[in-house]
Amino acid sequence: MIFVTGATGLVGSHLVSRLLKNNVKVRALRRPDSDLGLLQKVISRDHVHPDQMFDEIEWVTGNILDYYSLEAALEKVHTVYHCAAIVSFEGTDKSKMLENNILGTANMVNAALHQGVEAFCYVSSIAALGRATVGMKVTEKTMWKNSDRNTVYAQSKHEAEKEVWRGIAEGLPAVIVNPSIVLGAGNWTNGSAAIIHTVNNGLKFYTKGINGFVDVKDLTKVMILLVQKKLFGERFIVSAADVSYQQLFEWIAAWLKVEGPKIYANRVMSKIAWRWFALRKLLSGKQALITRETAKTAHSKNYYPADKLISHTGFNFKPLQQSINEITAIYRDENS
């Protein structure tokens, strides 16, 4: 039995769909109020008989903050994929995100140790890696430094990783993946999938920041591969390519056949933008498209080579332009 947390999110839903395609038994954790819509969509795209495949999932209602429910959920489980996390760059989510991402991961590690699972894969983030000197490459060995360049999300994932390393020291057969920004067909109004929707609706501004990106389907392939190869006690950057936000937006606009952003948003404009969105949220309650943290990171130039992963596994990433083509095609089909 394979156990998956975060099965209703972008990474978790694609992972569950791939595991079902591999004809393995999947048990998944969900909260009582979880929206299963994304998972159902992903399965419907991937399978000939989606309803039948969805019914194959064994659901456990619970929460990663409830340790004792996790002990019961992991009975007769041999492999755990811990994908659940809160991803937010809103200051109001700080306490909730820190608790969920750190304590929730500690609970998962402890329950996995208690039940003696044979494999544990933790989905971390490139955000949990140390920041190299501007313009230099970040690798799995880059040391973490406390800095105002680190977001609260990054801090939460760094601390959560420490819980996994603690579990490894206590005998947990675990591997950590550090994906870059994950692109995939998801909920089009939030997360990374919202980039597609925003460009389609006429995004006017771009920045010259550079970041790593990876297709969610590649990420799930890598996660399963690393477990199969039993590459435990290691962390791996999972990133297909480093590109500028400007280039990414241009590719998306080209595939959608809409005009791409033409106005360069410098740092001053970005500061004005996040303050305007913060005021709008205060007055109307609408989610801020730009926050203080995202405005800062949008100008950073970061490079994340996946050399270690490739040397250990020989994995070939899908070209990023092909990923964007496939994702935008799904967006057009679902929003035409």
Image (spheres, rainbow, N blue to C red):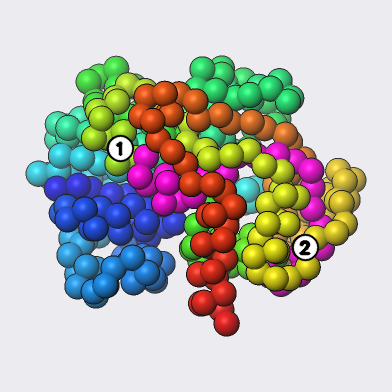
Q: Is residue 286 left or right of residue 316?
A: right
Residue 122 % position (x, y): 36, 37
Under circle 1, the secondary element is: helix
**Was residue 219 drawn as part of the magenta stretch in this picture?**
yes
- Residue that extends furthest to the left in the rendered view of this protein: 76
Residue 55 % position (x, y): 19, 69
Residue 302 % position (x, y): 67, 32
> Which residue was labeled with disc 2?
260
Residue shown at 57%/74% (left/top)? 332
Does residue 196 appear anywhere in the picture?
yes
**Quarter of the view holding residue 234:** top left
> Which residue was labeled with disc 1?
225
Which of the numbered marks, if any, corresponds to residue 75? Answer: none
The local crowd at label 2, few if under 14, some if 14 to 19, many if 20 or more residues have their Cα within 10 Å, is many
Q: What separation in Å lies between label 1 and label 2 (alpha carbons)?
A: 37 Å
Q: 314 and 181: which one is in front?
A: 314
Q: Which residues are magenta?
A: 200-222
- Residue that extends furthest to the right in the rendered view of this protein: 268
Residue 23 % position (x, y): 17, 55
Quarter of the image containing the C terminus?
A: bottom right
Residue shown at 60%/24% (left/top)? 138
Q: Are marks 1 and 2 in contact (CB under 8 Å)?
A: no
